[in-house]
Amino acid sequence: MTHLQVRALRKSYGANTVVDGIDLDLAPGECFGLLGPNGAGKTTTLRLCLGLTAPDSGDINVLGMRLPAEARRARARIGVVPQMDNLDPDFTVRENLQVYGRYFDLSAQEVAARIPALLEFAGLANRGDDNIRALSGGMKRRLTLARALINDPDLIFLDEPTTGLDPQARHLIWQRLRQLLAQGKTIFLTTHFMDEAERLCGRLAVMDHGRMIASGSPRELVDRHIEPQVVEVFGDSAENWARDHGAQLAERCESAGETVFCYVHDATHLIDDLAARPELRYVHRPANLEDVFLRLTGRDLRD
């Protein structure tokens, strides 16, 4: 049984189609990542899959239950980590978990029994009596993740879970998410961090303008949509070099600010040319998921 199945899902607001006929399947125990620029429809898709927004058309099945008709029953088995922390600042760490447990009709004894393990999971075992205002941003994010587990969910939705965190906090969140996957939990993740998606997700989809425009494993997406090698060229004369030489040496060149991105299957001749130009600096690297994302969705800034 799939933990999430979506068919021909559509949602519009006036003349603006936000979700445009998407299909989606999540198998038990997998981490699925949904990528896309701002305004692509990711958050609306999550809201539809949580039963918080009614679709215009299409079918949503979560853990064997139809949404939105059975949304309340389905949410009892779902965990949600929202984009922004919404912890109650008037409560302590422990009280935030206690209050949230009541939404799932858990008894006070059940919640109390679960809290020590959740605090340990969040790295907050010694902070249970601290007020939320005393926590750092990383601590709050870990507590929000732990809170989403109070009902022992089978399926967990995470909307950009590490935005605004420093590298140490991000790595700790990743470690905790891997623990959840090892326990057999299913994770639906949206993120703007390509390295996060590559590290955590076995399967990804890129969404833009309300549609799924590509899907597969991180490695499959790179192999399918981008040349295998990238040479980034920097310097005041990089664009002139690209026009006069790079276009002949690379299969494709793209400019972004003072950087020229050259995409090739074999970088030998390109590197030989650049080595003779001390006024230019360059980095030679394998193609990655960010290259795929930018090729599919463009380099223009989205607001």
Image (spheres, rainbow, N blue to C red):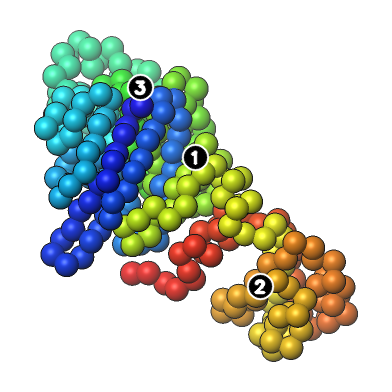
- For image coordinates 14% across by 29% down, the residue present is 70
- For image coordinates 36% across by 40% down, the residue present is 24
Q: Which mark is residue 252?
A: 2
Q: Is residue 23 visible?
A: yes
Give percent across and percent down for residue 16. 20, 65
Give percent across and percent down for residue 181. 47, 26
Kind of element beneath mark 2: strand
Q: Which residue is mark 1?
A: 203
Q: Earlier in the sequence, mark 3 or mark 2?
A: 3
Q: Nearer the viewer, residue 235 or 188?
A: 188
Name the kind of residue labelled 3 in the image: Met
Q: How many residues crowd around disc 3 within 10 Å: few (fewer than 14), some, or many (20 or more)?
A: few
Q: Nearer the viewer, residue 63 or 171?
A: 63
Specify the quadrant of the image occupied by residue 136: top left
| Relative to 207, 97 lies left or right | left
Q: Earlier in the sequence, mark 1 or mark 3?
A: 3
